[in-house]
Image (tube, grey):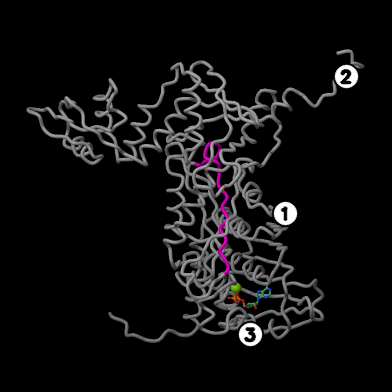
């Protein structure tokens, strides 16, 4: 039997819309915490009692007057926007005026609040729909304490469909961590069942925050960059520049199995942006080992009219105006971050003196390729001198700050790879190279990367052009065969670079080594080879001085 169409009762409508904003404990936490941040809080204490479906958020924000407190939970009431035009310039985290109202239909809500400038605080218990059911004076410090209890009590199917408490708490923790990264000046204290669970301390350096949050990520392995970037269409009103802040894991020291820490925030909110995430991944292309992903937290502070938050109710997905413009800026910033070095120093306790030295060297590893001006396109080469070759494998290089050990094969591979990317040159070979028994895919593959290939009789093919780097090589035919089995042009370029680069075990003259060093320090990604292996171990003078205990005062009186 078909049902006839009828308007839904208001309660049902409320339940449906409320359920879109509030669908888990984590979403309650998100909404309450965002209200605290909008109120200017710098200290937020969160208490969770998951078995009781209860959450409390206490903040030291601006608080509410009694009038505002009475209105706070009624439908569509907000202090954050007033009119349509405001929707296009949203600078607060909240603006729909929905969260508190929704909570009154899904849970019990109680708020204590005291404004900073007013007298005394008040406590209100709200009824279903958000009317103030009980009002009384309350003695509290300036700020607001919101308690949500018995969430989803009248919606048992919602509760039943929820993941385990452990999983829900994981989601809550992830929510807080992500919000904390976007608000680095806030102190967070989080309790579960009346016991302290975790805290996050404020820091000016987002890298410091990231290392607090993710155990495996160490601050010295990160590099932080803050840039002012231009806005698109400057033609009308000149607006102040936007800000781009970037924290990356240095590709020779820090990468992950999954892209779980490739994160993007816009105007203080973590967002899902497949387009920008892709820009980041592309920026790290060919700097990491196979199947490894970078660590990168990107935060853009851009004019609010560039962002449309109305893509979904949780505001986690957005539309960005001038997407191409922002993508270009991000790509440039990542390129800059990969070229420059982090100078942050971290002491770590290590057992043996050698590993201490290596660790100190790695952490400090100041590859000062381009010390004077980071914006310069082609850096003047650093004053670097090849002094020796060890085991026909490592180049020992001296520079004013210490010494480098550079692995000759991969340094050369990086140089050739970038040359090939910039200029994939194909040259004729005479006589042609003859290959046997190629499959149609192999033939297509060779055509794809630009080679001239034609049949030359039964099961025979003639290759008349080859990549310039392979031209003079004895193993040219073998190399072409390898290319025919590979993937796209870039994979071919990596393969050609790897095959053509100087082998380890080859003895080099001083001028040869000098040339490699100079070319290598001009590359765009000097830290790793196109397979992601580190190229250089840097031993800095201060680390050496420490290792050799140069600070010891050895006087005649000691009899040494
Ligand atoms: P929105 O955040 O979209 O405005 P909410 O329902 O979350 O809607 O909150 C309604 C209003 O209650 C807010 O606009 C704000 O004025 C007030 N409010 C809520 N939480 C707090 C808080 N922690 N401190 C001060 N004011 C608050
Ligand atoms: Mg809100």
Task: State yes or no: discs 3 and 2 in contact (Cβ < 8 Å).
Answer: no
Residue at 53%, 47% in the rendered image: 376
The percent coordinates of residue 520 (x first, y second) are: 48, 33
For numbered disc 2, what is the local secondary structure? Answer: loop
Q: CA distance from mark 3 to mark 1?
A: 34 Å
Where does the magenta region start and end? 240-256
User: Up-down: is 336 above or below 473?
Assistant: below
Badge 3: residue crowd in 10 Å (few <14, some 14–19, many ≥20): some
User: Up-down: is 133 above or below 60?
Assistant: below
Q: Which residue is mark 1?
A: 196
For numbered disc 1, what is the local secondary structure? Answer: strand
Q: Which residue is mark 2?
A: 555
Which image quarter has ligand 2? bottom right
Q: Is residue 369 visible?
A: yes
Judged from this view, the residue extending furthest toward the right is 557
Kindly tell me whether mark 2's CB lies below 8 Å from ligand 1.
Answer: no
Question: Closest to the observer: 44 or 256?
Answer: 256
Dividing the picture into quadrants, the one containing residue 328 is bottom left
Task: State yes or no: discs 3 and 1 in contact (Cβ < 8 Å).
Answer: no
């Amino acid at each position: 039997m078909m049902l006839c169409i009828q308007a839904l009762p208001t309660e049902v409508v409320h339940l449906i819309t409320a359920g879109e904003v509030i669908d888990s404990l984590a979403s309650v936490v998100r909404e309450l915490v965002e209200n605290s941040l909008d109120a200017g809080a710098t200290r937020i204490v969160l208490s969770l009692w998951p078995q009781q479906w209860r959450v409390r958020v206490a903040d030291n924000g601006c608080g509410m007057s009694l009038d505002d407190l009475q209105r706070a939970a009624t439908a569509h009431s907000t202090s954050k926007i007033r009119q349509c035009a405001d929707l296009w310039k949203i600078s607060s985290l909240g603006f729909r005026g929905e969260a508190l109202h929704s909570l009154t239909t899904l849970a019990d809500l109680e708020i204590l609040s005291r404004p900073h400038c007013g007298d005394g605080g008040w406590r209100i218990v709200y009824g279903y729909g958000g009317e103030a059911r009980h009002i009384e004076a309350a003695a509290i410090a300036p700020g607001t304490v919101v308690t949500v209890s018995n969430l989803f009590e009248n919606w048992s199917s919602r509760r039943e469909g929820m993941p385990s408490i452990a999983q829900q708490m994981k989601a809550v923790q992830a929510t807080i961590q992500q919000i904390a990264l976007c608000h680095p000046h806030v102190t967070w204290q989080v309790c579960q069942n009346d016991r302290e669970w975790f805290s996050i301390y404020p820091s000016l350096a987002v890298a410091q925050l990231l290392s607090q949050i993710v155990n495996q990520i160490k601050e010295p392995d990160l590099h932080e960059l803050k840039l002012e970037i231009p806005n698109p269409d400057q033609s009308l009103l000149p607006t102040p520049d936007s800000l781009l802040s970037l924290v990356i894991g240095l590709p020779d020291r820090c990468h992950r199995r999954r892209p779980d820490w490739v994160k993007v925030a816009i105007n203080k909110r973590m967002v899902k942006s497949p387009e920008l995430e892709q820009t980041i991944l592309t920026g790290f292309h060919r700097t990491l080992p196979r199947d490894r992903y970078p660590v990168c937290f990107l935060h853009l502070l851009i004019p609010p009219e560039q962002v449309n938050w109305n893509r979904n109710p949780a505001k986690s997905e957005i539309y960005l105006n001038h997407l191409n413009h922002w993508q270009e800026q991000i790509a440039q910033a990542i390129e800059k971050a990969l070229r420059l070095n982090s100078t942050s120093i971290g002491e770590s306790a290590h057992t043996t003196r050698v590993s201490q030295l290596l660790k100190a060297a790695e952490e400090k590893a100041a590859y000062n390729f381009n010390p004077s001006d980071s914006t310069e396109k082609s850096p003047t080469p650093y004053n670097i001198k090849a002094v020796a070759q060890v085991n026909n494998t490592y180049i020992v290089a001296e520079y004013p700050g210490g010494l480098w050990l550079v692995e000759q094969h991969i340094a050369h591979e990086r140089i050739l790879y970038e040359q090939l990317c910039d200029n994939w040159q194909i040259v004729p070979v005479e006589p042609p190279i003859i290959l046997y028994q190629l499959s149609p895919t192999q033939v297509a593959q060779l055509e794809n990367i630009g080679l001239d290939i034609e049949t030359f009789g039964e099961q025979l093919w003639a290759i008349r052009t080859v990549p310039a780097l392979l031209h003079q090589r004895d193993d040219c035919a073998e190399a072409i065969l390898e290319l025919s089995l590979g993937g796209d042009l870039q994979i071919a370029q990596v393969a050609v670079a790897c095959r053509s680069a100087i082998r380890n075990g080859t003895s080099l003259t001083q001028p040869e080594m000098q040339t490699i060093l100079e070319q290598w320090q001009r590359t765009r990604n000097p830290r790793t080879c196109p397979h992601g292996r580190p190229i250089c171990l840097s031993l800095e003078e201060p680390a050496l001085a420490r290792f050799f205990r140069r600070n010891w005062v050895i006087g005649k009186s000691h009899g040494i």
